[in-house]
Amino acid sequence: MVTKKIIGRAEYIWLIRDDIKRVPARIDTGARTSSIWATSIRETAKGLEYCLFGEDSPHYVGESVLEKHFSIIAVASSSGHVQMRYKVPLTLQLKGKRIRTFCTLADRSSQAYPVLIGRNTLRGKFIVDVQHGPRALDQLDRARYDELQLLM
């Protein structure tokens, strides 16, 4: 029998290939596909080039990633807005479990979390309990909420 780990509504992940640790990620069982903040996205003769995160991010290293295996998919938001996005394979670690998944590349600069983990990545591996998760990420979420309230 496989034991599923309990995770909270936000967790830290580790991006294996790029060795970027302690990246805040929002766990979203309502989202089908996972998503990661990417900038400078462009198709070249060699494949898809992009940078993980943006210059304002503490996780930004400025190195281009070259991905030869990618696709383009339509992603619909909960409000019905549809976007075409690149989808790339990614290996990450969550709660000590190494996971090979797919993420869409998106501008997440206005989001509290630079990574969103959707149900396709979570399925069969985790149980989500919103009372769990690092308390520091609760503060990150609260700060973003407060920032949005000031805009109103």
Image (tube, grey):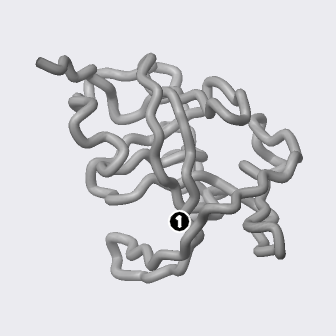
Q: Is residue 84 left or right of residue 129?
A: right
Q: How many marks?
A: 1
- The residue that label 1 is drawn on is 152
Q: Is residue 30 left or right of residue 94?
A: left
Corner quadrant of residue 131: top left
Residue 97 visible in the snapshot? yes
Q: Is residue 53 above or below residue 3?
A: below
Q: Amino acid at mark 1?
A: Met
Q: Is residue 129 left or right of residue 31?
A: left
Q: Quadrant of the N terminus?
A: top left
Instruction: Compare residues 102 and 23 and report the one nearer the observer.
Output: 102
- At x 27%, y 31%, the residue is 125
Corner quadrant of residue 117: top left
Q: Is residue 80 above or below residue 98?
A: below
Instruction: Compare residues 105 and 138 and report the one nearer the observer.
Output: 105
Q: Is residue 122 above or below residue 30?
A: above
Residue lying furthest right = 62
Instruction: Compare residues 104 and 7 and report the one nearer the observer.
Output: 104
- The spot of residue 45 in percent (x, y) is 83, 75
Circle 1 crowding by C-alpha within 10 Å: few under 14, some 14–19, many from 20:
few
Residue lying furthest left = 1
- The spot of residue 146 in percent (x, y) is 53, 45
- At x 53%, y 34%, the residue is 92
Corner quadrant of residue 108: bottom right
- The spot of residue 127 in percent (x, y) is 21, 30
Residue 139 visible in the snapshot? no
Which type of secondary structure does the marked residue at label 1 adopt?
loop
- The spot of residue 68 in percent (x, y) is 69, 62
